[in-house]
Image: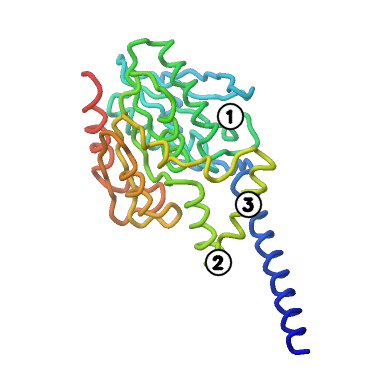
Amino acid sequence: MKLKNTIALVGATSGISYLAYRTISNKLFNKTFTRYDKGDLVEQKYLDWIDSCKKEQISIESFDGLKLNAYDVCNHDTHKYMIVVHGIWSSKTFMYPRAYEFDKLGYNMLLIDQRAAGDSEGKYYTYGLKESQDLQQWIDYLIKKDPEVQICLFGLSMGAATVMMATSYDLPANVRCIVEDCGYSSLREEFDHIVRHDYKISFTVPVLMSLEKKMKDQFGFGLDDISPKTCLENNEIPILFVHGKDDSFVPFDMAKILYNHNKGIKKYYPVPNARHTEANIDENYYSNIDTFINTYFNS
């Protein structure tokens, strides 16, 4: 009788756990993959700056039929361009403060809205998988406009994953360098961290299995298909790895994982006391990035 009761109790507990894991995975899926236009709040001086820029709003069609939009900001008579790529739950507007500083350094910029963000179409984020294919088209746009263009890919958070995953493609020589700021090493490792950190679950396997099944049913790809660290194993484009040491969303340790996986020229730039997307609190942030880029740009 005791054995029977024990088996029944284990079965009931397992059932509750399964339902709990499934509920969490569904919540995580809806929160992290579905478009969320929260609106980016920036200081008025940056809005005034973008209004004063010599810029053109442009659009391209993605490989899967989405209309994607960007600002082509061309304030300087130079071939030097930065493609500035924002992160999740965000848009190009969030990047205005950084773009303002890059403009002062003399760079022209393509400020893009990634799919499912800002003025671009799309319902779902794919964490760099499809976004990296979109990025190739933006690169092609700049080269058609100026065959002598020199390009730095700058990405923040999910945008950092986008620029790193783009290295798995045969990028043209016009792409001289990459700056990735607080990017994740892989989606599996990032979601494992989120489940542990946000949901206080130490055994993450059931949640990730349920989440991955939903991903494959909805999109046709899984967690391991989104792995910036794997893409970097054959990368030969010089890359600067920037990461805040107090980042609790994308753990600081991921920067070292990415750095160690990268094949080619690389530089490591840890920023003390900086949280996620806040490495620019360092007074040397922009000068360090400028020095790195100009090492690979022609004067």
Residue 137 picture location, percent across and down: 49, 20
Q: Secondary structure at mark 3?
A: helix
Q: Which residue is mark 2?
A: 201
Up the image or down, 182 lies above or below 7; here it is above
Which of pointers 3 and 1 indicates the residue nearer the eye?
Answer: 3
Up the image or down, 248 lies above or below 100; here it is below
Residue 24 horizontal side relative to residue 202, left or right: right
Q: Secondary structure at mark 2?
A: loop
Which of pointers 2 and 1 indicates the residue nearer the eye?
Answer: 2
Q: Which residue is mark 3?
A: 211
User: Number of callouts in the render?
Assistant: 3
Quadrant position of residue 269: top left
- The three-letter code of the residue at mark 1 reads Asp
Residue 124 picture location, percent across and down: 63, 38
- The three-letter code of the residue at mark 2 reads Ile
Residue 67 horizontal side relative to residue 171, left or right: right
Up the image or down, 238 lies above or below 189; here it is above
Residue 55 picture location, percent across and down: 44, 19
Category of crowding for the residue at label 1, using alpha-carbon neighbours closer than 10 angstroms: few (below 14), some (14–19), many (at least 20): some
- The three-letter code of the residue at mark 3 reads Leu
Tell me how the rendering is colored. Answer: rainbow
Q: Which residue is mark 1?
A: 119
Look at 55% across and 19% down and name the residue there. 59
In the rendered image, the residue lying farthest to the bottom is 2
Quadrant position of residue 181: top left
- Give me the disc on residue 147: none
Look at 31% across and 29% down and name the residue there. 236
First reached walking from the N terminus: tag 2 or tag 1: 1
Residue 178 picture location, percent across and down: 34, 32
Q: CA distance from mark 2 to mark 1?
A: 37 Å
Question: In which quadrant of the rendered image does the C terminus lie?
Answer: top left
